[in-house]
């Protein structure tokens, strides 16, 4: 039986492993279906992780030393997908993709989130090279330039306002002519003369070359077309937390989640199930930043350690 199973090997899961093992837990395994590092490894540049900034640092560069450091104190990595986690009695059972099961005293759930894709041509090709899902992270690269935002929810409008402070102009592309964002936010957008609304419109295609995105072909509901020559487009069409692992055979979730499927935790990353902690993007009110995910992971790792020590 594992002392602690960590599901997900992004910044949250890796840091949970570091803190749990360095604090003295002997038998800790992190189940990460890919290479450890998480979604930040898709980012072409990161400059807001404190202490390690250098010009042109990619997300991959940032994460490269993490696995070695985090595994230095005994954390093991199994490159397996966890399909489901259940709890019978005091302990947890992880059901792996190869059919195996693993028992654990405590679980840190750190599976992250996946920004939804809008589905236009070129979205995948230019993802991380002009197509982004994080204005806080990538907006600065378009300082003084024109850029575009896709979506009509709170995130799209708030991020359009954020980008309008940095960029010379922001085209806000939305498929309808009314927004689902909160009215005060809509009002602020309407009043911002750096934001041009491109309504009843969708992105047909993103185009560019080896250096990245050059622009977008826009299609309007009335059949007309327009080309926007922008080096960046921010896609905010919703986010999915990766919570399916918590789904039980009867369709319920192992622990409490909110309406968006985010795992409800307290300030110590405790879920409402004893011994189950959640950290990073998957938890409620996550700031969706590497430094915050790492912080959550540290807290969850320490709490998992305390939980196991109390049971021994
Ligand atoms: P994730 O990084 O999502 O890691 C979760 C891991 O769990 C993944 O590796 C996944 O493979 C694994 N996993 C999921 N389900 C399972 C399963 N069932 N079994 C096994 N493994 C599983 N943040 C910043 O602070 N600064 C930036 O500049 C920045 N730029 C970004 C740019 C891009 C393009 C993107 C996409 C995000 C960016 N972010 C940035 C956000 C940042 O990447 C996330 O907030 C952070 O990675 C969240 O960490 P996490 O550990 O919670 O989850
Ligand atoms: P959201 O509310 O689901 O909005 C997604 C937007 O993207 C919608 O406008 C939708 O259009 C559009 N969209 C969806 N799929 C698309 C596609 N394939 N192509 C083009 N457009 C597409 O997502 P969100 O803005 O990320 O917000 C998620 C939740 O968090 C919401 O409950 C929101 O209120 C909340 N939130 C709150 C705050 C705040 O309180 N300050 C801030 C951010 C988020 P339609 O409108 O036509 O469906």
Image: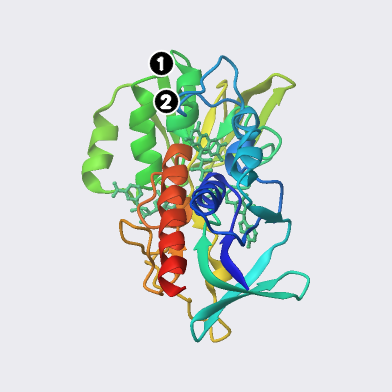
Q: Position of residue 204 (x, y in %)?
A: 63, 39
Looking at the image, residue 47 sits to the left or right of residue 264; the answer is right
Q: Residue at x 52, y 46 (%)?
A: 15
The count of marks equals 2
Q: Residue at x 35, y 29 (%)?
A: 162
Q: Position of residue 213 (x, y in %)?
A: 64, 24
| Vertical relation: 237 (above or below) 269 | above
Residue at the right extreme of this rendering:
98
Disc number placed over residue 35 in the picture, else none: none
Query: Coloured how?
Result: rainbow
Describe the element under mark 2 as helix, strand or loop. Answer: strand
Disc number placed over residue 170 in the picture, else none: 2
Query: Mark 1: few, some, or many residues within 10 Å (few <14, many ≥20)?
Result: some
- Frontmost residue, 188 versus 21: 21
Q: Looking at the rendering, in which quadrant would you find the N terminus?
A: bottom right
Q: Position of residue 75 (x, y in %)?
A: 63, 52
Could you tell me how far apart the alpha carbons at marks 1 and 2 are, in whole angstroms?
A: 7 Å
Q: Is mark 1 within 8 Å of ligand 1?
A: no
Report whether residue 72 is seen.
Answer: yes
Disc number placed over residue 168 in the picture, else none: 1
Q: Position of residue 111 (x, y in %)?
A: 56, 57
- Frontmost residue, 63 versus 287: 63
Q: Residue at x 36, y 62 (%)?
A: 265
- Frontmost residue, 173 versus 131: 131
Report whether residue 116 is seen.
Answer: no
Q: Residue at x 60, y 47 (%)?
A: 73
Q: Is mark 2 within 8 Å of ligand 2?
A: no
| Vertical relation: 292 (above or below) 268 | above
Q: Badges 1 and 2: C-beta atoms under 8 Å apart?
A: no
Describe the element under mark 1 as helix, strand or loop. Answer: loop
Query: Mark 2: few, some, or many residues within 10 Å (few <14, many ≥20)?
Result: many
């Amino acid at each position: 039986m594992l002392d602690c199973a960590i599901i997900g090997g992004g910044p949250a899961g890796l840091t949970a492993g570091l803190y749990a093992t360095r604090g003295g837990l002997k038998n800790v395994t992190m189940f990460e279906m890919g290479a450890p590092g998480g979604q930040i490894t898709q980012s072409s540049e990161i400059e807001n992780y404190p202490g390690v900034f250098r010009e042109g640092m990619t997300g991959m560069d940032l994460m490269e030393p993490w696995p070695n450091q985090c595994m230095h104190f005994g954390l093991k990595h199994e490159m397996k997908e966890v399909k489901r986690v259940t709890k019978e009695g005091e302990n947890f059972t992880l059901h792996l993709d190869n059919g195996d099961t693993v028992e654990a005293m405590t679980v840190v759930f750190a599976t992250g989130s996946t920004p939804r894709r809008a589905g236009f041509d070129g979205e995948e090709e230019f993802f991380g090279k002009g197509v982004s899902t994080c204005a806080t992270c990538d907006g600065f690269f378009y300082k003084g330039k024109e850029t575009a935002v896709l979506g009509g929810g709170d995130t799209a409008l708030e991020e359009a306002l954020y980008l309008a402070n940095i960029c010379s102009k922001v085209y806000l592309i939305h498929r309808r002519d009314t927004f689902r964002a909160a009215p005060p936010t809509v009002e602020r957008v309407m009043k911002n003369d750096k934001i041009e609304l491109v309504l009843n419109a969708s992105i047909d295609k993103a185009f560019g070359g080896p250096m990245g995105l050059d622009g977008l072909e826009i299609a309007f509901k009335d059949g007309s077309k327009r080309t926007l020559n922008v080096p960046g487009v921010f896609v905010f069409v919703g986010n999915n937390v990766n919570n399916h692992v918590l789904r039980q055979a009867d369709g319920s979730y192992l622990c409490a989640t909110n309406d968006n499927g985010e795992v409800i935790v307290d300030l110590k990353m405790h879920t409402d199930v004893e011994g189950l902690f959640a950290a990073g993007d998957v938890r409620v009110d996550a700031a969706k930043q590497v430094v915050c995910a790492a912080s959550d992971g540290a807290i969850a790792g320490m709490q998992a350690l305390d939980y196991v020590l109390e049971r021994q």
